[in-house]
Amino acid sequence: MTDTTTKTTEPAAEEASGLPEELGGWRIAGLLSERLGIEVTMADIGELVDQEHLVVQRHFKGRPMYATAAALALDEDLVRAVVSERLAWEAASLTRDAAAERIGWHWRDIERMGAEGRITQGKGGRYLITDLQALAAEADGEQCITAQTAAEDVLEIRHPADWKYVEAAGWITPAATYEREVGRHRTVTVALYRLA
């Protein structure tokens, strides 16, 4: 057991000899990628830190710095396992915007369902694909849509010409609102309406 540890740390010490004592996450990820022949990302470095296999030495300009020798001395199987776990999660999940596009809902609905615990949200703010597919079937009608979509696709009326009369009559009221950036310094409030 001791021989294995010695063999692993000696090449790491040789590799680290021409490098600074501490490097940032991107550089550590690049070194591990070169050494192992797989793509190691910042998400993998973060996971190694969370599992306490890699320790933040200090911060430089607000960014964490890691000991180069310690990073290169990490067990290859451990790093490969972390990378493969990330890749498996990425294959089984979608980002918020991709999830919304896949089932044809507004991204706010995806966020709301994730916050309510109705769909699994995991690392990187990603959503499990199987939950999304089940959600689309079970919760049909629970999504929120914009006034333009409600007028043109659901009610088949002109927007904004006829829409203002529907709102004034009180037949429909916004279920939620959100702020959308318009330009650099302005936002507009967008009303969302419940489909069901």
Image (spheres, rainbow, N blue to C red):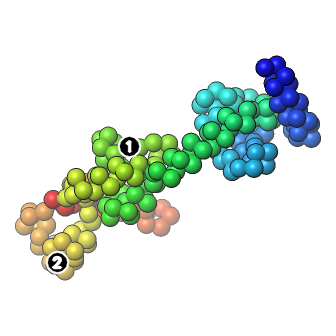
On the image, which quarter does residue 2 sit in? top right
Q: Amino acid at mark 2?
A: Glu
**Please, what secondary structure does the residue beneath circle 2 have?**
loop
As measured in the structure, the alpha-carbon distance from the residue carrying label 2 to the one carrying label 1 is 35 Å
Q: Quadrant of the C terminus?
A: bottom left
Mark 2 or mark 1: name the one nearer the start of the chain: 1
Residue visible at 69% across and 36% down in the picture = 77
Q: Which residue is drawn at the image coordinates 62% and 39% (left, top)?
A: 82
In the image, what residue occupies the spot 16% across and 78% down?
157
Q: Secondary structure at mark 1?
A: loop
Indicate left or right for 81 with 196 as reference: right
Viewer-side residue, 103 vs 175: 103
Q: Quadrant of residue 71?
A: top right
**From the viewer's perspective, is residue 97 above or below residue 17?**
below
| Image location of residue 67, percent across then percent down | 78, 32
Q: Relative to 158, does residue 192 appear above or below in the rendering? A: above
Residue 168: assigned label: none
Residue of label 1: 120
Indicate which label's residue lies in the foreground, 2 or 1.
Answer: 1
Residue 98 visible somewhere in the drawing: yes
Give 167 or 5, whichever is nearer the viewer: 5
Question: Which residue is drawn at the image coordinates 69% and 30% (left, top)?
Answer: 54
Quarter of the view holding residue 14: top right
Indicate the quadrant containing the N terminus: top left, top right, bottom left or bottom right: top right
Query: Within 10 angstroms of label 1, few (less than 14), some, or many (20 or more) residues?
Result: some
Residue placed under numbered mark 2 in the picture: 156
